[in-house]
Amino acid sequence: MHGRPRKAYKPEEEAASAAKAVKLRSLQNQFMSNHHAKIYTKEAIDLSTKLLEINPEAYTAWNYRKLAVEDALSREESNQDLVKSVLDEELKVVESALRQNFKSYGAWHHRKWVLSKGHSSVGNELRLLDKFQTLDSRNFHAWNYRRFVVELTNRSKEDELKYTEDMISKDFSNYSAWHNRSVLLSSLLAKAEGFMPNEKIPDEYQLVHDAIFTDEDDQSGWFYHLWLLDQTVNVETPLLTSSWPSHGSCINLSGGAGCLNDSSSSKLTTSCSESGSFPLILYFNQAVGGVSSSTVTVDSELRGNEDLVWEPVSNKNSRVSSVWVARLKYMSSEPCFPKEYTVKVRIGNSPGIVSSRGCNFSTPYEFVFTAHVHDTVREDSQEVAVSWTDGFDIWDAQSKDLNFLVNLDQQMGLKWRQEAIEEEIELFRALSDSKIGKLTLARLLMAKAMISENGVKGVHYEEILELYNDLMVLDSSHYHYYKDEHSVALLHKVTSSTESLSRHLFRYRDMNNSVCLRLNNLSLSRIASVEKLLFVQMLDLSHNELHSTEGLEAMQLLSCLNLSHNRIRSFSALDSLRHLKQLRVLDVSHNNIGEHSVDTTRYLCSSPLSNSEWTEDEVGRQMTSLVTKYWDAYFVLRDLNLKQLDIAGNMIAGDEFYTLVPQVVPTLVWLNGHRVRS
Amino acid sequence: MSSTSSSFQMGELVADRHVRYILMAEKKKESFESVVMDHLRMNGAYWGLTTLALLDKLGSVSVDEVVSWLMTCQHESGGFAGNTGHDPHVLYTLSAVQILALFDKLDILDVGKVSSYVAGLQNEDGSFSGDMWGEVDTRFSYISICCLSILKCLDKINVKKAVDYIVSCKNLDGGFGCTPGAESHAGQIFCCVGALAITGSLHHVDKDLLGWWLCERQVKSGGLNGRPEKLPDVCYSWWVLSSLIMIDRVHWIDKAKLVKFILDCQDLENGGISDRPDDAVDIFHTYFGVAGLSLLEYPGVKAIDPAYALPVDVINRIILNK
């Protein structure tokens, strides 16, 4: 099926082929009748041997041979010599089939099955493997079989590590050997007996340099190097990256259904919520499970918060996430008697928080914030829709709210990591003309920014952005990969200091000085640095190149989101917004919703297609055909309690769709700027 | 590739020729190429019929003929064989179910029997065997999950364990292999990502890491290979492409270049698509080429579901209608 040249058959060739076909057909028919009649005579077995010689992919013949072997063994189990000769014969047949087609799944499995009955030596099997390695060092069947034999015979990981090193030194362009090396090494590093990361990882960098620099187009070492970088930069232990409220901050809350206009106060983050509660957000450096009221304690006088329920911000099937939220209740104070509460959050006092890779959150961590609770102010329901252009004040530069940007410095074992990165940066700077050179240098500089203590972090970002710009030209096939990385670096830069972030912050008067972050017109194709933006209530991402809201789910305070003039293709791309319980205003006008036949977020959206539960509601029953046609809009919108929605300028926006929307969103007041409900 | 007709432009899908190629291949049952693949005729039927469906020509075949042959391949265990008389295996059981889904004839099945055969192949560790002889491979995890989901019997297996086993096959480059520790390969990646997609478990995939590995399958000619330092092949236009789509990273490759590569693999005269330009064509690559073009939104090709590998309207009909 692969690699045969295209040519028309000459008549002699046709005739020869037809004759072969007749022979094979007759052989197959005879075999079938033996198989169905359960005939296991020597003649019958030899027939199957002939069949497998011509066609090692005839899987039924391999099944038949297993039955024949079982039949023989059941009759002769006491006769060890006979048993051995029966099994040896099978190994011979497999070997000859593999010579015909060394990628035959049936043949390899038959060998494993025979071996499970005993009677071959490790030496034999390893010799066979060496033969196949020489024929094709990338034959994954052979590598898999090697792992099978190694496990069966308990060969040491260190020996196998040496084997991969031998393969690599013979030919660096052996991805399979690098892969196997990574499997063995990561297992040895985890056990930490004489395999310490701070010693071994720098050695591995030396080993992989040849593979990268000898042929700049050969990918064999690229992914191994990336794994080494990951081992250098990312700490195994789960750590808290950020929280909202953050340590030492002060939040204003008001009771009941209203919000106090407190523009005179320089203390920020007025949080208004209809439910008399506010979110407590924990953002970890990796996905963890086990966050609960036993592993996270919240001490305060805010009553009604015993046994807090912690939820992971992730899809319904997952009990792990890097973002966890609990809602703390508060009661409005008496008029003219605002109350102040100190809240102390302790994480990890009891064990139980574990990363998805099985690493425990080991060092307990504590942070404290203050909540000011004001009295209820009865406020009229909004008369006008929220505007994105009018009613904004500039940010108070003296505001203390951005002190969360101080790194929660819980990094451990930093020195060898920083040294390794510095050495790599020096090396790659010298060879940065190639694609892999520039890409690796950009990644190294990002890594350096992430693991360096506070300091001149801003300096490297210009260089990183320039490298990605170069790559967009140098390797235009992967333009959008580099574009996405560029956006990530840009957002890291914007959020790297209080000063640069402040330039994008505003306050919206009409909503009690809500914090508004404007990141519009930045050619952003991707969202990042969300862990530094948990305090944001209004987000303007209009006029960018976003095609998904992936990443926004952590922004639990978000009440207003502007995604107009982006590249959103479907409602399924907005799935992450379903986690934003406070979202009331959404603008997705002038996007591409409804334009494409292929939905790239079809399976990233919770729906029956991904076997997520579906509780049927009235709308689903009454409007079945519309709900099927606009299934993703239905599932996403019905989980949002939107007051205001803008969807004009999308192909999906039409009379038919507009009949569905108000039914699916009963809280909707404004659609495309017009009232749909009083 | 020489074309005697000047009416073909460079870069056009000769859909009618491919339809004719498929319909004629069905009739050439006694060629040597056909006899040697006798045992996987069920797969071949699925590839051919799905291609016809994507080109909106499913009506060219006799449903009754196909279905009655298909049912002769069912074993007393409930599983389907690759052809009449052969042994049952999940590979062919899925293809049989997919073919019946295409024809909207799933109701002729004893769903309980088929689903029990498939569910019975799940092992203690969550993995799946292909048949009673115990070969374990993540391909079979995908096949079983896909099959049972179409039959709406996913609750017959331990989904959590099935997912855990697939995750145990995740490699440090973000890809997946056939068993734990096995090298990443685009075919296996499709199977694992597809299974995770169907079970709502894509959060286990590091989309950026895997996305980069997958997008680097695109070589200078615009085609895709299946793993580093290998030759491009049209079948990877499906496995790599559908994986990229399921994790929303397809924008990381050059789609126009890939379209051109696939079109260059056509036999413009006789129809059919080959693994590489100027190689011999076959049904397998014809299907993957057309399916790839569907994912690339090529005009005139119906949309295909990247996880179930069946037309979107078929899957929406089965899954979204309660």
Image (cartoon, coloured by chain):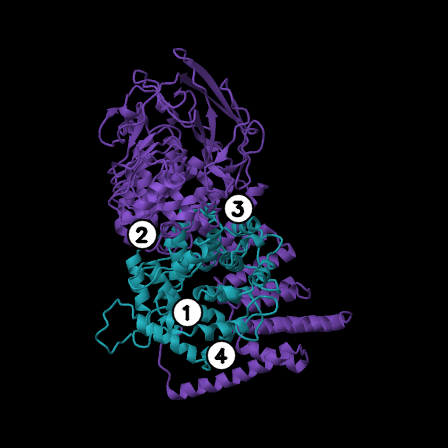
Chain colours: A purple, B cyan
Q: How far apart are marks 3 and 2 (CA)?
A: 30 Å
Q: Distance between the residues labelled 4 and 1?
A: 19 Å
Query: What residue is rendered at 47% in x and 48% in y?
Result: B200
Amino acid type of the residue tagged 4 in the rendering: Val
Viewer-side residue, A205 vs A607: A607
Amino acid type of the residue tagged 1 in the rendering: Leu
Q: Residues within 10 Å of mark 4 (few under 14, many from 20)?
A: many
Regarding residue A87, the answer to whether it shows in the image is yes
Chain hosting mark 2: A
Q: Nearer the viewer, mark 3 or mark 1?
A: 1
Q: Distance between the residues labelled 3 and 1?
A: 45 Å
- Position of A339 with respect to B16 (left or right) is right
Q: How far apart are marks 2 and 1 (CA)?
A: 34 Å
Q: Which residue, given by chain and number where applicable, does mark 3 sit on?
A: A186
Q: Nearer the viewer, mark 3 or mark 2?
A: 2
Q: In which quarter of the image is residue B81?
A: bottom right
The tag on residue B35 is 4
Q: In which quarter of the image is residue B257?
A: bottom left
Tags 4 and 2 in contact by the CB under 8 Å rule? no
Amino acid type of the residue tagged 3 in the rendering: Ser
The tag on residue B49 is 1
- Please tell me whether mark 1 sits on a helix, a strand or a loop: helix
Question: From what the image shows, is residue A602 above or below residue A265?
Answer: below
